[in-house]
Image: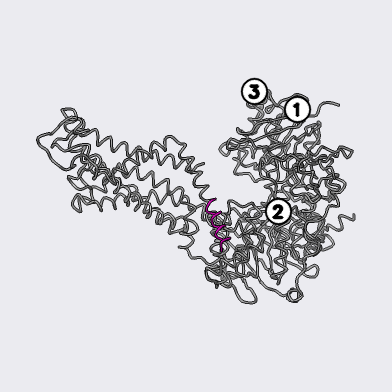
Amino acid sequence: MSAPTLELRDLSVAYRVRGIDRQVLRGVSLAIQPGEAYGLVGESGCGKSTAAYAAMRYLPRNGAITGGSILFEGRDISAVPEAEIRELRRAAISMVYQNPIAALNPTIRVGEQVAESFALLGNGRSESRRLAVEALRRVQIADPSKVMDRYPHQLSGGMAQRVVIAMALASSPRLLVLDEPTTGLDATVEAEVLDLLRSLIAESNTSILFISHNLGVIRAMCNRVGVLYAGALVEEGATATIIQRPSHPYTVGLMRCIPRGGLDKYDSHLDTIPGTPPPLGTPLPGCVFVNRCAIARESCATAPTPVTDLGNGHTTRCPYHAEAASMPRVVASEPVTASDEHRAERGRDLVTVAHLSKTFAQGDGDVRVLSDVTLSLRHGETLGLVGESGSGKTTLAKTLLGIHPPDDGSILAIDGKALGSTIDDRTAHEVASIQIVFQNPDSALNRRHSVTRIVARAVQKLAGATPQASEERAQSLLDSMSVDPVLHSARPGQLSGGLKQRVAIARAFAGSPRVVVCDEPTSALDVSVQANILNLLADLQARENVSYIFISHDLGVVRYLSDRIAVMYLGRIMEIGPAQDVFDGPHHPYTEALVSSIPDVDGETRVRVRLGGEVPSPAAPPTGCVLHPRCPRRIGSGVEDLCTSTEPPLREIGPGHAIRCHLDVGQLGSASRAATA
Amino acid sequence: MSAERDLRAVARAERDRIRSERLRQLRRNPAFVVGAVILGIWVVCALIGEFVVPHEPALVDILSTNKGPSSEHWFGTDVVGRDVFSRVIVGARPVLVMAFLATVIGTVLGTVIGLVAGYFKGWADVIIMRILDAISALPVLVIALLALAAVGGSSQPVTILIIGFVFTPIIARTVRAAVLPEAELDYVAAARLRTERAPHILAVEILPNVLPPIIVEFTVRLGYAVFAIATLGFLGVGVQLGSPNWGSQVAENYGRIFADNWWSTTFPAGAIATLAIAINLVADGIVESFEQ
């Protein structure tokens, strides 16, 4: 057997911060064979990116290899001169970064940048351009010569990532490092980029080091996977094995955190991993996971944990791996239940939205971001809002909150009483009754104010309490969000992401709201923290009988928390119904494409339903059904002309389940049908 | 109750730690240290100079005019026999006080206008910014001279107001640029969602987050103000005539600089230069410490 393309042997990397070396990688050993795709998973700060950069010998100035070696095709490159490394990067190793727009130079045309990667390989000017067009065609860009003339900001995220991939593949590298290449992309675009990568890899003998926090993506892309925690590789093996039979308590915990397989809040709380990862550079003489492990022994803290081979290339660093799969849960699995009194209220409408439109004036034209949205939100329920970016989810939420006014003729009401169009037209009580938890807690919390002050001020204004009483109420709210009293006087900058989000939730609940909009509240968080937040939201809902509008691109998360789901596309509701019906189908062709594009952690093979082309601009929506140019089921449906000429109405196809489509129910796809077929 | 006090103490300690971190960084910056020391000396001169000078600064001694530096008169005497050293020391006060007040006025006005323009945007922003553009098109010295000519030449309050007025658009623009992205952040929407009024949002929510650029701009402007006041003094306006003012001192003596009296011009000129440079060094240090 030939030498592995990349091999890390007991690699240690440290960053020097304020004169102290902090260990970031602790003796990582792994090998990637030619043509193999190797995934590296782990939560933020575990050293994934450092491992990737170390593989290219591309560490920040304060980073240094403190032990072990990096072998590229059998040759130790951990100490070779910089010039040789540059030569390797030019000809044999390529990298694709997370943010494709930032990876391209905004002032240079795309074509020139792609051609440059060929010119670097010694091709002439015109030859480089010809090869660049070829390369763009290879990454399935429809009109390469036109794209060559564009600037990076004129490309969509998915298109830009294709361009970056084309540049990375220019040298036919033997090793391709991909650092979260699809993280910023919409689900349907992500699925296309992953398809593309898969087919490109199949054609060549390129080895892949694929870094992601998303186990679904890893499952779809990689043969083998390594799990990093606190800079140590705690488990490694075939992807399916790791996901189905994890043998390290950390991996087991990680798998339990993820809402999957159609799990919802009425089945069970999500399990979590207790505690937080050790701070960067903490000395850990024993097992790196000991502080958070449910089955740790006393010896785990001090004795080094050797690698245990479980056969078939599956290795774990836990000596008690036999107990890992059955380790006790941290959170009891009991379902989330509401009181009888609250349950009696369920089913009644709380918020009514009818014929809601929102038009933004933009330059010389108007952009209609929401078009005739009609829906209701019931007492104590969660309405999930899904759809790609630009579908109008956030605009719908912000209009409901009164952050910007809807167009004339729109109807908004809570408890049967009409709501003013903006915050200024609403009473303090009405404003308090609809609140929001924002996506990014760094932006949502004033970094100059203390935690108590942020929450107390909200109590004071929304509940009309005295400053003294507000402060007390704020303390008890924060306590009920499990924010340690020691942190109440801290600034947001001193808190972790999960804690910041708890503070933001406490603020939203300050005035006893009836409706809380959750705008991607967990998308910036690691899965174990996400599980905690989802449990908290579900428990708060059961206790306070509050209704949620839950926006998320993660369909597993939406399904876990939602009673009903509305699918949006170009400012319109394409489908709305009970969560189970929307997911199982028969569903709208757009929903079908959305559901089928999610890479499944459990590796369930689904028929991929593709949407052609890109999302049209809401400034010039297509005629008829807005989905028709991209619809996978229009051709052959027999109503092609109707689809292009007339916008379909929202039509009921089951109890409380409506779709905006001309096709007969029998012609629609359904996840349950596809699975059995 | 004592537990709560403990928590407060922890929080205060944390805040102090961040603040002392920045101070330590400043202390390690040699340019900042040099600037701060020079500025400190001039501030001390302004505070207590009049009590410690060896000679009465305004005392005319026609028996000892144009005397070179000696142990009696360290910086020599000027054309009418006044002690240059004493006059330079005492001259620090009017420059520093006027420059400081003018910069404070400009900063406060500019901050208020910048906050309003950046937060409300739309028509308010367009109108405010066009007016500011018009003001900043006028050269400071020309407006100052016109205004002072109108009120009679030597009014210190008018000088302070004019300089503050001319600084306002520059500071307003800096503040507006900092407010624009800040106002898009979700904590501002969150404040609106608890029915806060615009003045509260501007003063309590946004202002603390845009302080760093304001502090930087303040120090930079302070340096310019020193220059502007010295220049006006040299032109014989905007300061009390006959007062120990660096600009006036240069004006009164520069005719003899190549004849028999270089000291009466050089020392006050040097005072202006060292103060201006010191403030700029301090400003640079502060800019750097905020950038990191």
Q: Secondary structure at mark 2?
A: helix
Instruction: Judge depth for marks 3 and 1 and give the one in front.
Output: 1
Mark 3 or mark 2, earlier in chain: 3
Q: Position of residue B18 (x, y in %)?
A: 52, 47
Residue type marked 2 = Val
Which secondary structure class fits the magenta region best? Answer: helix
Q: Position of residue A579 (x, y in %)?
A: 77, 63
**Residue in the foreground of this view, choosing between A520 and B85:** B85
From the viewer's perspective, tell me whether residue A310 is left or right of residue B202: right
The subunit letter for the residue under badge 3 reads A
Q: Residue furthest front?
A: B2
Q: Mark 2 falls within which chain? A: A
Residue identifier under label 1: A71
Question: Residue A398 sits in which quadrant?
Answer: bottom right
Q: Residue at x 13, y 37 (%)?
A: B80
Magenta stretch, residue numbers: B1-13
The residue wearing badge 2 is A529
Give the residue type at disc 3: Ala
Q: Amino acid at mark 1?
A: Leu
Residue A14 image position (x, y, % from top left):
66, 35
- The answer to whether B131 appears left or right of A149 in the picture is left
- The vertical placement of B196 against B37, above or below, is below
Check disc 1 and report its element: helix, strand or loop.
strand
Task: Tell me: residue A355, above or below residue A132.
Answer: below
Q: Are marks 3 and 2 in contact (CB under 8 Å)?
A: no
Q: Are marks 1 and 2 in contact (CB under 8 Å)?
A: no
The residue wearing badge 3 is: A83
Task: Report if residue B41 is visible in the image.
Answer: yes
